[in-house]
Image: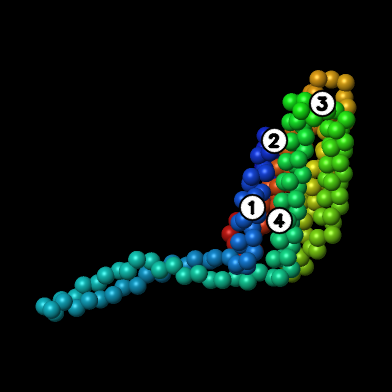
Amino acid sequence: MQPNPDPKPGRWVLPVVVLAMMGFAWLFINAAEDPTVSASDITIASPGGESTTTTLPPVTTTTVVELPADVVAYNTAIVNAGIEMAGIQEQIGQANTDWDARTVGYSQTLADLRDLDAQVKTWRTSLDAIPLPTSLTEYANFHAIMLAAATEVSETSGDIVTGLQAPDSGEARKAALALFNESVTRYGNQVNSIAEYRPGADS
């Protein structure tokens, strides 16, 4: 489950909304499809006594595999957390855009970014309370990787505030924002990978 960094700001906001729609649809279905293919031959007798054999097209059948309830609950929780982070990321991006355009003053921008950084820290702490599935042992590793990515998000968000206060022309702030967005993307990739995981499926 390797992350795929994308340094472009805001790139992960839309994918996480798509993830939410896909994820919740999957959670309601609570199943994975395992198609198997079979074919049947039908022999048809003609009036002259000769027979012809026709092969019917393959028939696809679906085997429904129930997922443990604790896995379903876990996936719901991490998808919700991902949506929450996408919202915070969007607000941080907007605050920086407003400051670049000088449509919002310095004092207000500083207050907004400090408040958003505090929200990121609270969000990171809330992930520790998500119950880890015990029915499938591989989720312990999945969860550890996701938490590490989330910690990076929390660590980089404060650098945006520091960058705003730096005595330069905005280079430090913009660099910090880029790193924050990259961290959010890595975190989002982990959420996607976990939500898309199907126990027993071929990798």
Query: What residue does disc 2 label?
Result: 9
- What amino acid is labelled 2 in the image? Pro
When the figure is inspected, residue 58 is found, relative to residue 186, above or below; the finding is below
Return the mark for residue 19.
1
What residue is at 85 percent from the left and 28 percent from the top? 106
Give the residue drawn at x 86%, y 41%.
115
Which is nearer the N-term, disc 2 or disc 4? Answer: 2
From the top left corner, tell me how far across and down residue 151 is, in percent. Answer: 83, 46
Residue 117 picture location, percent across and down: 85, 41
In whole angstroms, how far apart are the C-alphas of marks 1 and 4? 8 Å
Disc 3 marks a residue whose amino acid type is Ala
Taking the spot 84% from the left edge, 46% from the top edge, the residue there is: 119
Label 4, label 3: how far apart the Cα atoms are: 32 Å
> 143 left or right of 12?
right
Q: Which residue is mark 3?
A: 172
Q: Secondary structure at mark 3?
A: helix
Query: Circle 4 is placed at which residue position?
Result: 79
- Amino acid type at circle 4 is Val
Is residue 165 at least partly visible in the picture? yes
Q: CA distance from mark 3 to mark 2?
A: 15 Å
